Amino acid sequence: MADLVVRSTRVHTGLRELPAQIVIKDGLVTGLRELGETVVAARELDLGDQLVIPGLVDTHCHFRDPGFTHKEDLASGTRAAASGGVTTVFDMPNTEPPTTTPDRLRAHLDDLDRKSVVDYGHNASAVEPDLIPELAAAGAAAFKLWMSYDVERTYPHSPSTAVTDRAVLYRAFEEVAGTGLPLYVHPTDHELYNLNSSRAKEQWGVDPASYARSFRLGDSVAFNAAVATLLEFQRSVGTRLHVLHLSSVEGIRMVREAKAAGRSVTGEANPFAMFVTNDWDRIEQRGPFVLGQWVPPADDVAMWSAIVDGTVDVIGSDHAPHTTEEKLPGWKDMFAAPSGSPMIADYLRLLLTAVHDGRLTLDRVIELCCVNPAQLVGLTGRKGTLEPGADADFVVLDLDHVAPIDGSTSLYKCGWSPADGIVTRGRVHRTFLRGTEIYRDGEVLVDEGFGRPVIG
Ligand code: DOR
């Protein structure tokens, strides 16, 4: 007898949408049956016409734990994830201390085990190439590098998680290739960005608009030169390269070409760029609370085309909270305030709205947020899908819900969202992880530590 059967006229498995009964036993999807067939189960859930999709897999979030737990921690961040329909998370290593050594990675995974309410893995830092094989053996899901660090602020891009020396970067490519894991890189050429930020300051001062423009000087040369370097290193070494923050015409052209040549390259886009920082009025109105990087109109068109046509493989939330007190000084000097904003609870709502508006198909959203991120980290068939054999991770959606996003009612510690005020259509009603309901209408229903490791 099954533990649970879930019925809906609209089940999207990741591969197809169909009316179905999802049969669940021991936390796994054991079958998909036609509606009307007899299924014997201990519990039944009739969802009528509510859309059911696989739980989202977020390969890019910053939970601030350890070191910056006043912004977020592994419990609050994963609760917010559950509220956003995210059932598997992979957090980033720019913590304090950063996850640069096997001991720190093991301690971090133990901490996730105690605190996470969703399933989890961790992206270790690749700043010390010699430690990469040991980090992989200790359970890294992937590796992360920044190519640039902040000069006027100490966070979020600290020197301890960045590699500016090309020889060290090349060594990291070689060592990561040996592990078979993907290397995620934040592409910004350090010297070119510093040149551009000094030029922006000279020309426009230090307000948020100047900061926004600094990234795009020379038609995004700091971003594009970094992408060119990464693609050349990938060509030379063969590493599985995952290019983060794809949002420039030229960067996208280069990645598209590399993929067409059959190279092991994937691309990521981020909701803040798709819905927030591509809107200059919003940058002027919300300043530090949306920045991040500005996406000018031509880049926006290229980014959305890349998201639609498959050049972008994955949407990562890039959930990166900071407190209001930390952001406020950015109105005077954005170069000294932290960049990044929370997103993990909001991005599915924004994407469902894009589906409603005809900008993306539901199939594509599920590929970008469920199927492809699971594939990136070697979890095809287990996460990001509701086909038989998968973990029974799913989200029940309320597609008629219309309301503005309001970070003050979110489960974020920081209490604000860069998308505040954006009216969305569609929301997460309930979230299930391995067959257990973990979230419903604003409330997390399981204790810290319910999440399990997915790597190793
Ligand atoms: O603006 C950013 N903020 N970029 C990153 O790469 C990291 C993030 C953060 O951690 O705040």
Image: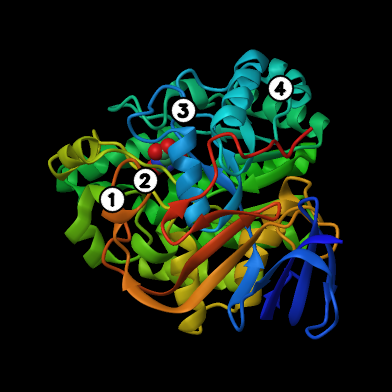
Q: Nearer the viewer, residue 150 or 319?
A: 319
Within the image, what quadrant is residue 407 found in? bottom left
Which of label 1 and label 4 is nearer to you?
1
The kind of residue on which mark 4 rests is Leu
Q: Is residue 136 left or right of residue 246?
A: right
Question: Residue shown at 74%/22% (left/top)?
Answer: 138
- Asked whether 411 or 220 is in front, the reply is 411
Res 313 visible:
no
> Crowding near pointer 4: few (<14 within 10 Å), some, many (20+)?
many
Nearest-to-viewer mark from 4 and 3: 3
x and y percentages locating residue 456 in the rendered image: 79, 32
Task: Give the answer, above or below, for where 11 lies relative to 344.
Answer: below
What's under tag 2, amino acid-wise?
Tyr
Q: Do tag 1 and tag 2 residues touch (Cβ < 8 Å)?
A: yes
Rounded to the nearest whole Å, what is the CA distance between mark 3 and mark 1?
Answer: 19 Å
Give the numbered dot on residue 412: 2
Q: Secondary structure at mark 4?
A: helix
Q: Is mark 1 within 8 Å of ligand 1?
A: no
Q: Nearer the viewer, residue 384 or 23?
A: 23
